[in-house]
């Protein structure tokens, strides 16, 4: 007697019934195995998504760090400009000697190296225009190569450009 006949006698089932139960158990096992394979694939997918999100968070952190550094440098520039303005205001409050008039600027300035205070010495350039010129220079990578580029700055016309050509050098 073989294994199926002995099992059929013990369970009081026919051979056909035992075959069907065996096939159904086989399909059940196959289903369990497939489900486990899919859950492993899903776990891999979730791990990849988590890593991607972590990298995005790292990028955001680095952007925040860069913005913080930029903000600190802008605050320092503003503090220095405020200190310079306070110094200028205190100098204006002091009584002047009648012979101490404001001297007209003569000479030239290298625009690519000039500070805010140096730019304000040029006739027709005040604190606002000096700030615009410095911002413009920063946008151009710290170096302006042609005088015609100054026409992009708000408040500079062809007439004012001619004045700037007298006082600026573009070295």
Image (cartoon, rainbow, N blue to C red):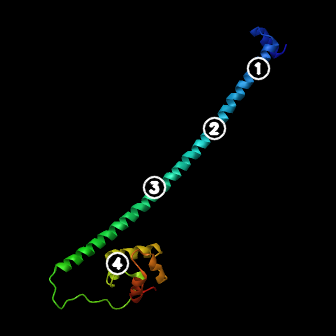
Instruction: Say what secondary structure mark 3 lies in.
Output: helix
Mark 4 or mark 3: whose residue is earlier in sequence: 3
Kindly identify the residue that appears in the image at 16 percent across and 85 percent down.
96
Q: Residues within 10 Å of mark 1 (few under 14, many from 20)?
A: few
As displayed, is residue 98 above or below residue 48?
A: below
Quadrant location, the N terminus: top right
- Label 1 or label 4, whichever lies nearer to me, is 4
For residue 116, which numbered disc appears in the image? 4
Q: Quadrant of residue 45?
A: top right
Residue 162 pos. (x, y %): 41, 86
Q: CA–CA distance between discs 1 and 4?
A: 91 Å
Kindly identify the residue that appears in the image at 55 percent across and 48 percent down.
51
- Label 4 or label 3, whichever lies nearer to me, is 4
Residue carrying label 3 = 61
Q: CA–CA distance between discs 3 and 1?
A: 59 Å
Toward the viewer: 128 or 77?
A: 128
As displayed, is residue 170 above or below residue 37?
A: below
Q: Quadrant of residue 79?
A: bottom left
Instruction: Say what secondary structure mark 1 lies in.
Output: helix
Q: Residues within 10 Å of mark 3 (few under 14, many from 20)?
A: few
Residue 30 pos. (x, y %): 72, 28
Mark 2 or mark 3: whose residue is earlier in sequence: 2
Residue contact between numbered discs 4 and 2, judged by CB atoms under 8 Å: no
For residue 40, which numbered disc appears in the image? 2
Mark 4 or mark 2: whose residue is earlier in sequence: 2
- Label 3 or label 1, whichever lies nearer to me, is 3
Residue carrying label 1 = 22
Mark 3 or mark 1: whose residue is earlier in sequence: 1
């Amino acid at each position: 007697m073989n294994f199926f006949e002995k099992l059929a006698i013990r369970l009081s089932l026919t051979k056909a019934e035992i075959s069907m139960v065996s096939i159904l158990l086989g399909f059940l096992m196959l289903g369990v195995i497939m489900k486990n394979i899919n859950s492993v694939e899903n776990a891999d997918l979730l791990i990849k998504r988590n890593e991607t999100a972590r990298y995005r968070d790292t990028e955001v952190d680095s952007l925040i760090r860069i913005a913080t550094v930029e903000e600190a440098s802008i605050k320092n520039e503003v503090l220095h400009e405020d200190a310079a303005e306070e110094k200028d205001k205190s100098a204006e409050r002091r009584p002047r000697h009648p012979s101490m008039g404001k001297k007209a600027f003569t000479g030239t300035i290298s625009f690519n190296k000039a500070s805010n205070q140096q730019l304000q010495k040029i006739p027709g350039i005040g604190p606002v225009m000096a700030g615009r010129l410095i911002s413009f220079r920063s946008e151009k990578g710290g170096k302006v190569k042609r005088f015609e580029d100054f026409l992009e700055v708000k408040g500079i016309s062809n007439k004012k450009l001619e004045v700037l050509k007298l006082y600026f050098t573009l070295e």
